[in-house]
Amino acid sequence: VQLQASGGGLVQAGGSLRLSCTASVPTFTNYRMAWFRQAPGKEREFVATISRTGGNTRYTHSVEGRFTISRDNAKNTMYLQMNSLKPEDTAVYYCAIRNAFRNGGYISQDDYDYWGQGTQVTVSS
């Protein structure tokens, strides 16, 4: 399994970015996917997750109403549309994947089996 994240960059506060994560798996719809982020000097934290069909999503409170997670199962790709960006959103963003039929939670790093390499998002004030 390989995950390739892209789309990060430098943007001013209030701006937008769209992150993408493409997974090399045989059956993409067998997997739940998520975004995490890690700011300098901080722990990696959960951002958003999406179910295998895309019908169920969940967000950390600080991004609700500003970020939208989605997936295109025909392209084996997940997205994170980030609007109204704030300087505190600055972090390396990681995509993660796990078997959708596995029991357990979905907001902890331990809930995911494979990780992408990360893409840097920097929001200037």
Image: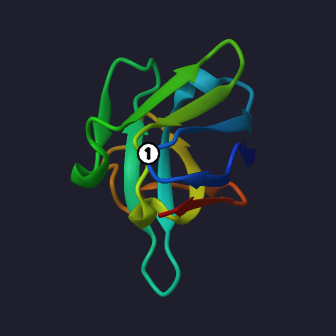
Q: Is residue 4 left or right of residue 39?
A: right
Instruction: Point out residue 95 in the picture as x, y percentages from the top left corner.
Output: 58, 50
Q: Toward which corner of the image does residue 20 lie, by quadrant?
A: top right
Q: Can residue 91 be seen in the rendering of this structure?
A: yes
Q: What is the count of numbered marks?
A: 1
Who's the residue at 21% across and 51% down the image?
61
Farthest left residue?
61
The image shows residue 9, relative to residue 74, as above or below, that is: below
- Name the colour scheme: rainbow
Who's the residue at 46% across and 53% down the image?
13
Instruction: Point out residue 24 in the picture as x, y percentages from the top left corner.
Output: 78, 36
Who's the residue at 34% across and 38% down the image?
66
Q: Is residue 46 left or right of residue 79?
A: left
The residue to which callout 1 is attached is 14
The image shows residue 106, relative to residue 18, as above or below, that is: below
Instruction: Point out residue 12 in the picture as x, y percentages from the top left corner.
Output: 55, 53
Q: Toward which corner of the image does residue 78 lie, by quadrant?
A: top right
Q: Is residue 118 left or right of residue 47?
A: right
Instruction: Point out residue 82 in the picture as x, y percentages from the top left corner.
Output: 47, 39
Farthest bottom residue?
41
Dot 1: element: loop
Neighbour class for label 1 at 10 Å: few (<14), some, many (≥20)?
some
Q: Nearer the viewer, residue 20 or 57?
A: 20
Q: Is residue 55 left or right of residue 36?
A: left
Amino acid type at circle 1 is Gly
Q: Nearer the viewer, residue 95 or 16?
A: 16
Q: Can residue 109 be seen in the rendering of this structure?
A: no
